[in-house]
Image (spheres, grey):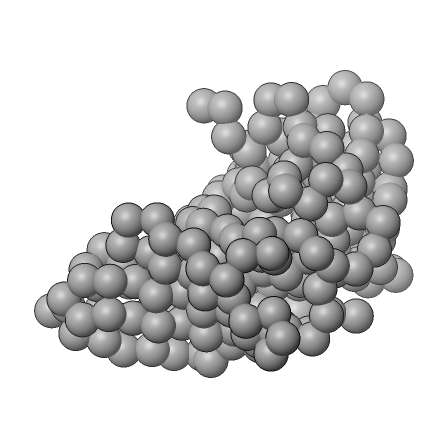
Amino acid sequence: GEDVEQSLFLSVREGDSSVINCTYTDSSSTYLYWYKQEPGAGLQLLTYIFSNMDMKQDQRLTVLLNKKDKHLSLRIADTQTGDSAIYFCAVPNSGGYQKVTFGIGTKLQVIP
Amino acid sequence: NAGVMQNPRHLVRRRGQEARLRCSPMKGHSHVYWYRQLPEEGLKFMVYLQKENIIDESGMPKERFSAEFPKEGPSILRIQQVVRGDSAAYFCASSPVEGLSNQPQHFGDGTRLSIL
């Protein structure tokens, strides 16, 4: 099955850039997702990238995909305190339907 | 609110009781997924259902856990004879169409189950 790995914790100062990394073992040619979870809440779809793209930019968010190395990253520019949350990488499994494997989540702490 | 609705938000049970968790998918969505999130752990897939069918229950414990998604009404995740280790946040997600991988799963806010 799919294995998705993320670092557990990242701490940055307000105004700096944050880079959250994710590696995976297998993926069908589909979309790869980033979700954000704030305390006590569910997962909110943040952004996604199609697997034939290298980069996608959406305001302060930049997603980079290195398909050869099976590496996905999420860059948050000008990180704000409201960005403090857990960020999950989600990768569809190869298979007949969209079963998705989630990473363990990276907890982003933004220091004022 | 057109999002995925889960209730209750918090549920407290004593060991040995039954827990029922409900999930109403987004309007127009016919596919439901249940996940469990243990403290300091990621999301673990439990079961995937369509209306009246269980498609994949490979992540669900063989005993005490069951899930259904009837033709009418919400999806139910049922845990019988709960034990302390069942304490977790249980999330439901829904998607509109099977097999189209550009349809992301949309999540509810979860049910936090505490076992005394």
Q: Quadrant of the C terminus of chain B?
A: bottom right
Residue B18 location (% of width, % of height)? 72, 48
- Residue B95 lies in quadrant: top right
A88 displayed left or right of B56: left
Q: Quadrant of the N terminus of chain B?
A: top left
- Residue at x-position 41% and y-position 65%: A74
Q: Nearer the viewer, residue B4 or A16?
A: A16
- Residue A108 lies in quadrant: bottom left
B99 displayed left or right of A30: right
Residue B11 location (% of width, % of height)? 55, 47
Residue A110 location (% of width, % of height)? 22, 69
Question: In the image, is residue B1 above or below residue B94?
Answer: above
- Residue at x-position 72% and y-position 40%: B100
Question: In the image, is residue A95 above or below residue A23?
Answer: above
A5 displayed left or right of A83: right
Q: Nearer the viewer, residue B104 or A40?
A: B104
- Residue at x-position 40% and y-position 72%: A20
Residue furthest to the top: B72
**Can you see residue B54?**
yes
Residue A26 location (% of width, % of height)? 72, 70
Residue furthest to the left: A112
Q: Nearer the viewer, residue A56 or A92?
A: A56
Q: Nearer the viewer, residue A71 or B55?
A: A71
